[in-house]
Image: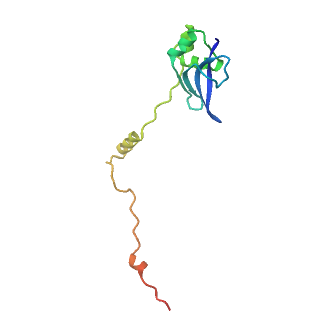
Amino acid sequence: MAVKIKLQRLGKIRQPYYRIVVADARTRRNGKAIETIGKYHPKEEPSFIAVDSDRAQYWLGVGAQPTESVQRILEITGDWQKFKGLPGAEGTLKVKEPKTSKAELFAAALAAAGDAPTTEATTPKKKAKKSDEAEAPKDEA
């Protein structure tokens, strides 16, 4: 059986993301897969790529042929160079820097302000109008 490593499209219109799957070459693009070996999210900046390197090496070793787009992804992760024995097996994958949590941002803002957190409101409350003016009876003529 001819086996290919290809992309299986998921997501909605204009928001694609893909699974990197191993499937029979005769199946359609989103047909039944033998195994899922990774993910690819092209719309993120930088693109999110996650490949199970051991499984990719196994399937390449037993003769699975990657499509052109999957081969480019494997070159970015370094799996293709590792399989072919080429230099540069570490790959050129860019990783998104982790976001700072809200608690860390709050602590940094407190340190910059030099104050301890307070439970009171930072803006003064508006004073209520005098109640005796509002409740005064009106004289009817």
Name the image quarter holding the N terminus. top right
Count of labels shown? 0
Of residues 75 and 58, the one drawn nearer to the viewer in this rendering: 58
Q: Would you place residue 1 above or below residue 105 in this image?
A: above
Q: Quadrant of residue 101?
A: top left
Residue 82 on image: x %, y %? 53, 11
Residue under the image location 49 percent in, 89 percent down: 140
| 81 up-or-down from 135: above or below | above
- Front residue (pair 77, 36): 36
Work out which residue is located at the far top of the displayed protein and give it. Answer: 85
Residue that appears at 54% across and 15% down: 56
The residue lying toward the viewer, choosing from 77 and 62, is 62
Q: Position of residue 50 (x, y in %)?
A: 52, 23
Considering only vertical position in the picture, is 129 above or below 112?
below
What percent of the width, then of the height, locates residue 88? 54, 13
Decide: is 121 above or below 35. Answer: below
Q: Quadrant of residue 75?
A: top right
Compare residues 46 and 19 and report the one nearer the observer: 19
- Residue 14, visible in the rendered structure: yes
**Which colour assignment does the render follow?**
rainbow
Task: Determine if residue 88 is in view.
Answer: no
Q: Is 136 on the left-hand or right-hand side of 11?
A: left
Where is residue 134 shown, x and y percent of the image? 43, 78
Q: Is residue 105 left or right of residue 65?
A: left
